[in-house]
Image (tube, rainbow, N blue to C red):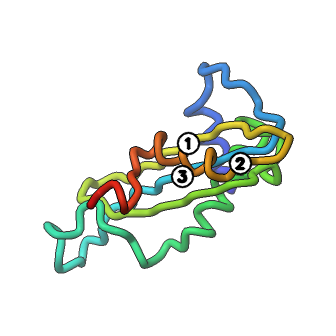
Amino acid sequence: MYKVKDFVKQDLEGFNLPLFLGPLLIVTHYIIPLPVNSRYKESRNYSPNPKRPDGDNLEKCLNDALTGIVWKDDGQISCLLRTKTYTLRDKGATILHCEELPTTSINFDLVLESIREKCNLRLIDEQT
């Protein structure tokens, strides 16, 4: 855990990020290298990853590592969307979007719209 926190701290050093103090919306996408022994490499690039590592364990590790660097405490995370996919590349990546939510009543339609905008997602109705 400390290695991850040290890596994140070093990687974000120099960006002068503000420390979020209020409730947070977090969108995280984990891109995980496809195992070497996979039989279906060509068809698996950016396909969903239903295997290990478990998404909740990835999330806990990242949330703890970002405490004190991006947010004051990971308990501030009020809304969370997590995805994980395979990649054919040798190295994986983590893409994180973080935004502070209002401390008053939350309009979840606006939260979902914000997620769609940030992730370039479309409603099923819009696709047909």
Q: Of helix, strand and loop, which one carries label 3?
A: strand
Residue pictured at 73% horizontal, 53% vertical: 64
Callout 2 crowding tier (Cα within 10 Å): few <14, some 14–19, many ≥20: few
For the N terminus, the quadrant is bottom right
Q: Of the residues shown, which amino acid type is indicated by label 1?
A: Ser
Judge left or right: residue 53 versus residue 123.
right
Q: Is residue 14 above or below residue 85?
A: above
Total label count?
3
The image quadrant that residue 24 belongs to is top right
- Residue 52 position, x and y percent, is 47, 76
Q: Position of residue 31 (x, y in %)?
A: 40, 56
Mark 2 and mark 3: Cα distance apart in space? 21 Å
Compared with residue 14, is residue 88 higher up or lower down, i.e. above or below? Answer: below
Name the foreground residue: 30 vs 78.
78
**Where does residue 43 sit, x and y in percent of width and height?**
17, 69
Secondary structure beneath dot 2 equals: loop
As drawn, the label of residue 114 is 1
**What residue is shown with label 3?**
28
Describe residue 114's horizontal placement relative to residue 93 as left or right: right
| Disc with the residue nearer the chain's start (2 vs 3) | 3
Q: Residue at x 85, y 40 (%)?
A: 103
**In front of the other: label 1 or label 2?**
2
Q: Left of 111 or right of it: where is 54?
A: left
Q: Estimate how packed mark 3 is, as few (under 14), some (14 to 19) or many (20 or more) residues with alpha carbons within 10 Å.
A: some
Q: CA distance from mark 1 to mark 2?
A: 11 Å
* Residue at image coords 23%, 77%: 38
Residue tagged by mark 2?
A: 107
Amino acid tagged 3: Thr
In this rendering, the answer to whether 106 lies above or below 10 is below
Q: Which mark is residue 32?
A: none
Q: Which amino acid lies under the numbered mark 2 shown in the image of this protein?
A: Asn
